Image (cartoon, rainbow, N blue to C red):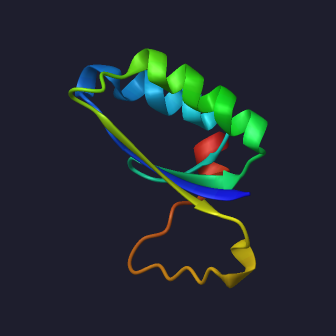
Amino acid sequence: MYIILTYDVEVKRVSKVRKCLKKYLTWTQNSVFEGEITEGKLHKCLSEIEKMVSKKEDSIYIYKINTPKFIKKEIIGKTKNFDEMFL
């Protein structure tokens, strides 16, 4: 499945959450990750995240897309250069 995951967490937890998500998905924008992931890996990822965040202060939104071929992404403005991000 393809997912888009967004998060809004307290500043003190941002680095830990981002580091965890980078193991499973592609960082596309501040507080936004996306990519193909299996149900099992998504469950593992979310289990790790739940241990880091506060359900009273933070929020994680997961948009699940079963057929990503119907997604049309338009970008206005600067796009991230993924090669530079991982070098």
Q: How many numbered discs sit on the rendered protein?
A: 0
Tell me the quarter of the image containing the N terminus: bottom right
Residue 4 x %, y %: 54, 57
Whole-percent x, y for residue 37 in the image: 74, 48
Residue 28, image x, y percentages: 52, 56
Residue in view at x 30 percent, y 26 percent:
55
Say which residue appears at 58% left-offset and 46% top-offset: 85
User: Is residue 57 in sight in this rendering?
Assistant: yes
- 54 horizontally vs 40: left or right: left
Q: In this view, does 76 lie to the left or right of 80?
A: left
Q: In this view, does 62 lie above or below 79?
A: above
Q: Is residue 23 visible?
A: no
Look at 61% across and 50% down and name the residue there.
84
Rendering quarter of residue 68: bottom right
Q: Within the image, what quadrant is residue 76 found in?
A: bottom left
Of residues 63 and 13, which is closer to you in this image?
63
Image-based side of 37 in relation to 51, left or right: right
Percent across and percent down for residue 70 are: 68, 83
Towards the viewer: 43 or 13: 43
Quick check: 27 above or below 46? below
Please tell me in which quadrant of the rendered image residue 10 appears.
top left
Q: Where, quadrant-wise, is the C terminus in this rendering?
A: top right
Q: Which residue is drawn at 59% across and 84% down?
A: 72
